[in-house]
Image (tube, rainbow, N blue to C red):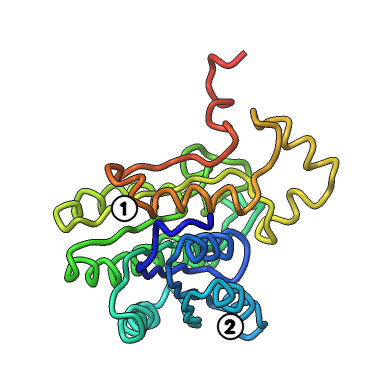
Amino acid sequence: MTDIRLKGKTAIVTGGRRGIGRAIALALAGAGADVIIADIVADDGKLEEVAAEIRKMRRQCLTLKVDISSWSNVEQMARRSIEVFGRIDILVNCAGVWIPGETLLECPEEHWDRVIDTNLKGTYLCCRAVGKLMSEQAGGNIINLSSQVGLNPGTGAGAYSISKAGIIMLTRQLALELAGKKIRVNALAPGIVKTDFNLDIWKNPAAERQISMGVPLGRLAVPEDVARAALFLASEDSGYITGATIPVDGGWQVSMSPLRQ
């Protein structure tokens, strides 16, 4: 992740303060891109820590506090990015929320609204705002973060699985609509990744071992696994791929096959 395939490119990464978003922001910078990192939390120092790491790579970095469920926030993010860098080549929609342990029948309306508004609506708003700018510059690359539970239902995933399934169709629809503008749109569908986002799932070593037994590659993902896949989609190595959803799950989808012995 230290080549220069993205030299001269500018990328926005939402949810870039920690976890998968942080790893993706660092991977893009390592490949030569200048990066805007946006997050709804901006007062705990983590955004600036990521920015400092990016600047050590001699790349430019802009940090922004953004609530992606708000159109005015998203529009301002896009406008500010253009003011500072002149163009946006890559958008990675990584920001999201999860309220674990709820079935759909147990999910209160306010939880449904929070998850759908952030994950699905927020991804759409970012695609809309930045996609318009990419259309004007006749080119761009959008990478959305779905999930393995966007492809298959998961116990206790509730509204989260619905939001992530919606992101897959959003990706496909946008890929069709924007192909004529030379904008590629793809999605990644990670399995369980060892981040603070799902710490309760893997913080117990025994529980982690048990969960890993259901993954053909025998371990849970780390953020860098997803970042490497995002780097591939952001580069011209994937120049003929659009509308795709790529699982990054250690073979979890394979393990769901009824033919697996």
14, 89: nearer the viewer: 89
Check disc 2 and report its element: helix, strand or loop: loop
The image shows residue 175 at horizontal and vertical percentages of: 25, 50
Residue type at mark 1: give it.
Answer: Val
The image shows residue 94 at horizontal and vertical percentages of: 49, 61
Tell me which residue sits at (53%, 31%) in the image. 253
Residue annotated with mark 1: 185
Tell me which residue sits at (17%, 64%) in the image. 138
Q: Residue 122: which quarter of the image? A: bottom left
Which numbered circle lies on residue 150?
none
Q: In this view, does 143 lie to the left or right of 225?
A: left
Name the image quarter holding the C terminus: top right
User: How far apart in space, not on screen, are marks 2 and 1 (Cα)?
Assistant: 28 Å
For the residues bearing labels 2 and 1, Cβ distance under 8 angstroms:
no
Check disc 1 and report its element: helix, strand or loop: strand
Tell me which residue sits at (22%, 61%) in the image. 139
Q: Residue furthest left?
A: 180
Which numbered circle lies on residue 42?
2
Q: Is residue 137 left or right of residue 9?
A: left
Q: Is residue 242 left or right of residue 14?
A: left
Q: In this view, does 211 lie above or below 107?
A: above
Tell me which residue sits at (49%, 47%) in the image. 229
Q: In this view, does 43 lie above or below 158?
A: below
The image shows residue 220 at horizontal and vertical percentages of: 68, 42
Mark 2 or mark 1, earlier in chain: 2
Q: Is residue 51 above or below residue 149?
A: below
Q: Is residue 232 left or right of residue 255?
A: left
Residue type at mark 2: give it.
Answer: Ala
The image shows residue 152 at horizontal and vertical percentages of: 50, 37
